[in-house]
Image (spheres, helix red, strand yellow):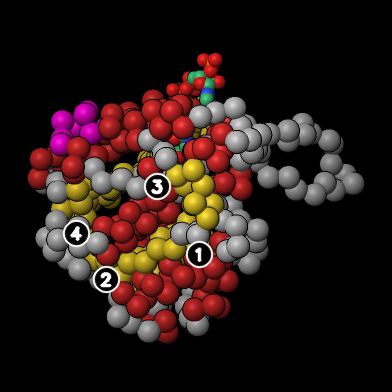
Amino acid sequence: MKIIGTGSAIPSKVVTNEMLASFLDTNDEWITTRTGIKTRRLRSTETLVDLAVSASRSAIESANIQPDEIDFCICSNVANNYVTPALSCIVQQHIGSHAPCFDLNGACAGFLDAMSVAEALLKTNRAKNILIVCAEEPSRFCNWKRRETSILFGDGAGAVVVTKGNDLKSLRLTTVPNRDVIVYQRRMENTPFEVPGVDITEPLIMNGREVFRMAVESSQRDLRLVIEEAGLTPDKIDLYLLHQANQRIIKSIQEHLAQPAYKFPTNIERMGNTSSASIPILIDELYSSGKLKKGDMLALSAFGAGFVTGAAVLRWSK
Ligand code: ACO
């Protein structure tokens, strides 16, 4: 596999910590020191479909191909307005592609899941050009009266086009079953035959400290394993592109790996946590600003509700 196109789209609305402090019992100092987040982008006028379509179009244009040359489309999304049809079907209709498509939900690690599926499709000659689009609106899972969760998230979409190649050196997905650390439940209709269950009182429930601990433990473990599997050592990695959940999580992983901070580029301070979109948005930002050089060795790592994790080593050749 190799990445031949990148794209991203973020909402126009910039929400600062001070804006949140106007209706939540919080402040810029707490949010900045605990998370590293200064601003996030939240949907206001645009829909998630708008963002997904825009990111996809940019990635296809960057790949220098036409939409009808996409022969598979995978969309990573945790939740959106449409339960069915899949978000990938809606995106395809907008971009003018008729390729087979499906959505996957790998929580914040969805980009790594999509890369894994794409690699299998390419290796078995089921596709030549695959569009992966990660589109997320985690701000809509939160109870906006709760300061513990609503300060963390941002909305956005990141996309890549991948084709056959030898840039993917290693990839690993894991699950440590633990459904309690992050749970987002959606209300559904009840049938007349159902025994009433427990009502959903809180949409998103998160044990922040436990997520923090599991993220650091699993990410540095996964990174060591994929780097070793790629025949490398941590110092041979040029950039570590980690899921943007919390600046302190990233710093802790950096310290565990004993690597310099400049190798860990971030957008959490501007974007908040954009779930599975965070890594492809970061890739697009780095590529567009000339910060990815041909031959750079990248280590990717993401983690999220489940508790699921994914990591990969990828050579950059675009
Ligand atoms: N503003 C001010 N005070 C707050 C806020 C807030 N927004 N939120 C919580 N507090 C208070 C708490 O009530 C608590 O008060 P108390 O001491 O009087 O009880 C105090 O701050 C400390 O709370 P902790 O939860 O212990 O703070 P912590 O240092 O653990 O930071 C945080 C919380 C930022 C959520 C951290 O644990 C974290 O980032 N964890 C990772 C969570 C994560 O990444 N989730 C993303 C979703 S899943 C994913 O992407 C993998």
Mark 3 or mark 4: which comes first in sequence?
A: 3
Q: Nearer the viewer, mark 3 or mark 2?
A: 3
| 46 sits left or right of 213 in the view | right
Asked whether mark 1 lies closer than 8 Å to ligand 1, one says no
Q: Label 1 belongs to which residue? A: 51
Cα distance in 3D space between marks 3 and 2: 26 Å
Task: Give the residue at the far right of this rendering.
Answer: 192
- The answer to whether the residue labelled 4 contacts the one labelled 2, judged by CB atoms less than 8 Å apart, is no
Q: Amino acid at mark 3?
A: Arg
Q: Residue at x 13, y 63 (%)?
A: 294
In which quadrant of the rendered view does residue 266 lie?
top left
Q: Label 4 belongs to which residue?
A: 292
Say which residue appears at 59% left-offset and 52% top-offset. 79
Among the two numbered marks 3 and 2 on one chain, the one whose residue lies closer to the N terminus: 2
Q: CA distance from mark 3 to mark 4?
A: 20 Å
Calculate the distance from the C-alpha at mark 4 to the C-alpha at mark 2: 13 Å
Q: Is residue 41 visible?
A: yes
Q: Secondary structure at mark 1?
A: helix
What's the residue at 18%, 42% (across, down)?
262
Residue at disc 3, secondary structure: helix
Q: Are marks 3 and 2 in contact (CB under 8 Å)?
A: no
Tell me the distance, in whole angstroms, between the alpha carbons under discs 1 and 4: 24 Å
Res. 269 image quadrant: top left
